[in-house]
Image: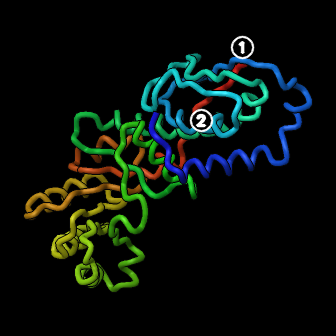
Amino acid sequence: MEALSDTIRRRIAEALAEDIGAGDYTTLWCVDEGIRSEAEIVARSKGVMAGLAAAAEVYRQLGGAELQGLLRDGDWADADSVVARVTGSARSILTGERTALNLLGRLSGVATLTHWFVLAVDGTGARITDTRKTTPLWRELERLATRAGGAINHRRGLDKMVLIKENHLACAGGIQEATRRVREANRSGLKVEVETTNMEEVEAALAGGVDRIMLDNMPADAVRNAVRLIDKHAPRPEVEVSGGITLSTVREFAEAGADFISVGALTHSAPALDLSLRIR
């Protein structure tokens, strides 16, 4: 299992506190303290697993029970397969059930949707990447899940890369002025990307000497033409395609010459994988 940061451990503690509150009265009043049990976590639908370390951390923090993953993050789980076992205090198993399943279901859903996007562009050379469209404060875990699904991570936060987007351009006065300001201020050598929506803006981005050009909400034919122009430039910037990419269209954009295809849906629209916990 992937090691968890202190930040994630704190988030899990907060999630447990949110769910338990003053106490899990149903379990405390129905289940004797000394009962020990074994439970299985079962995938009720097929998908890619992610979040097993986070689910295990739930029980580590609760104490009294231990979760053992039978698969690893990134592994495929068939429907009705057992993905983990939890052993120990029946009270602990029941109290941690919902928090552990919420984490596993959410993150495995992200990994599964990511897997389908990665599979759709297989053989093209394009890489699927996530975005900052993540659940507030859970970005680190959701980025872990997209990696489990085979994607690469985009910038983690605003301080990791310069990405000049439409609203920056509106405030700065266009690509030429925005890139000039960034060149003057960028003493730490951050990679610079600029968002473009047409060929005129692509030409301005090339003149600005940026490291990556985002082709945003362009049809595939326009992407293909833009890539032809970018390919003639030395040094050649990387090409990222973004904006409304779906599973049915992603391969067309990959074949148009994209190096990276960023998909916000990986984290903002992935359905949770259906999982259940069964006491044996």
Density class for disc 2 (Cα within 10 Å; few <14, some 14-19, many ≥20) is: many
Question: Which is more N-terminal, label 2 or label 1?
Answer: 2
91 sits left or right of 194 in the view:
right
Amino acid under label 1?
Arg
Residue 63 picture quarter = top right
118 sits left or right of 62 in the view:
left
Density class for disc 1 (Cα within 10 Å; few <14, some 14-19, many ≥20) is: few
* Quadrant in which the C terminus appears: top right
- In this rendering, the answer to whether 3 lies above or below 168 is above
The residue lying at 71 percent from left, 45 percent from top is 16
Report x, y in % for residue 262: 37, 52
SS state under label 2: helix
- Residue 280's tag is 1
Amino acid under label 2?
Ala
Residue 241 picture quarter = bottom left
Report x, y in % for residue 222: 25, 58
Query: Looking at the image, which is closer to me, 124 or 24?
Result: 24
Mark 1 touches mark 2? (CB < 8 Å): no
The residue lying at 85 percent from left, 31 percent from top is 27
Q: Is residue 61 visible?
A: yes
Query: Looking at the image, which is closer to me, 152 or 6?
Result: 6
Report x, y in % for residue 168: 39, 77
Report the label total.
2
7 sits left or right of 62 in the view:
left
The residue lying at 68 percent from left, 19 percent from top is 39
Query: Looking at the image, which is closer to me, 221 or 123?
Result: 123
- Outermost residue, right direction? 29
- Residue labelled with disc 2: 55
The residue lying at 47 percent from left, 46 percent from top is 266
Report x, y in % for residue 28: 87, 32
SS state under label 1: loop
